[in-house]
Image (cartoon, rainbow, N blue to C red):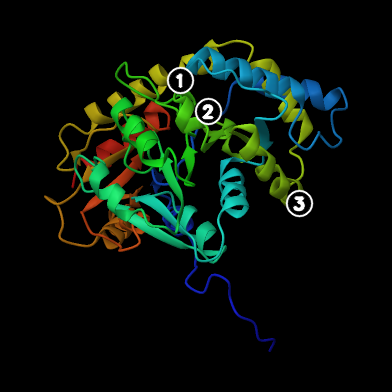
Amino acid sequence: MIQFQSKLPSGGKTIFSVISALAKEHNAINLGQGFPNFDGPNELKELVKKYLDAGKNQYAPMPGIIELRQALANKAHYLYGKNINPDNEITITAGATQAIFTIISAFVHSEDEVIIIEPAYDSYRPSIELTGASAIPYELEGPEYIIDWEIMQSLVTAKTRMIIINTPQNPIGKTLKEEDMLKLQSLVTGSNIIVLSDEVYEHLVFDGKKHESVLRYPELYDQSLAVYSFGKTFHSTGWKVGYCIAPHHLMKEFRKIHQWNVFSVNSFVQYALADFLTRKEHYLELSSFFEKKRDFLTYAMGSSKLKALSSEGTYFQLYDYSEISDKNDIDFARELITSTGVAAIPVSPFYASQRQDKVIRLCFAKTEETLSKAAEKLSRL
């Protein structure tokens, strides 16, 4: 048998794959993996078909079609007051995860350190480790999950190359506030630290609050690359189309990797998205849409012993199960599937330490019928 050395010796199946497979095996209601069980907008699908029929089936330009980049520049100015050059500050990517991988590959070197805020999206760490760098975790503590910026400052060393933030944050549903962004800006200004800002849930911020993008903060933006997702935004996760916004001096390096990694993203979807974005309501209505789903699930779970934690954004909500079971969260999640018929995601895999806080994550990007059935089952616990 051929011998080789694994570049990710500790890597295995993601918890999402494990839970989804188990849910399918037991025909459980899947509130685990973060995807809607309803389709994207009909108008957008019709636009995709329009451009397929129009023959937009060949390679797009490496950075993405200019029509879409211009639409995104217009959107960034409208939402965040930021003038973005569509020629050299925006690149269309094959989903947000590809953008994240490309950013880390472009700027992080062996022996560097990257600070990640945990619980963290599970692609960050392996992407860092593949460069030979070290992921330095800052563990947030529930139920508030607030960043102590003095602790964050203490993690910064001469080797710190990057800080990754995620707002609104998966899996905890928390958002960074203006105070957080100003402290982050103060921390990195004058240093060689790059900020990777994962903002894929930018339009899913609740209770009248606004999304605090790095694009709002000029000094911070100068050292940042921000990542976004059309799949998350328009309920079409299988399309795997996202984008990255960054100042030219950083985008130039990003594109050096992007051109050899993906080169370009499917053309017909780009043309469709460019048209679809001309109507602001397509993204402005999303916060209200998902806030109603959050509130529906919270109300439906009112009699459950599962305790809802605050969800300020994303389409996830954490639930504390400590009144129900002493089991670790992975075992509890497995038991939920096999005995209750509902799939949830345990939170410990989002921590390098596998920290046990007895919380699970439920996804409420589902129809009300699905949420109602799941809540009825969970309320029997």
In the image: residue 126, left or right of residue 183: right
Residue at numbered disc 3: 260
Amino acid type indicated by mark 3: Trp
Above or below, comparing residue 124 to residue 279 in the picture: below
Image coordinates of residue 258 in percent, x first then y, are 70, 46
Most foreground residue, 248 or 66:
248
Image coordinates of residue 94 in percent, x first then y, are 66, 41
Residue at numbered disc 2: 233
Q: Secondary structure at mark 1?
A: helix
Q: Secondary structure at mark 2?
A: helix
In the image: residue 380, left or right of residue 259: left
Label 3 and label 1: CA atoms lie apart by: 34 Å
Amino acid type indicated by mark 2: Thr
Of mark 2 and mark 1, the one earlier in the sequence is 2
Residue 303 placement: quadrant: top left
The residue furthest bottom is 1
Image coordinates of residue 259 in percent, x first then y, are 76, 46
Of mark 3 and mark 2, the one earlier in the sequence is 2
The answer to whether the residue labelled 2 contacts the one labelled 1, judged by CB atoms less than 8 Å apart, is yes
Most foreground residue, 246 or 306:
246
Residue at numbered disc 1: 286
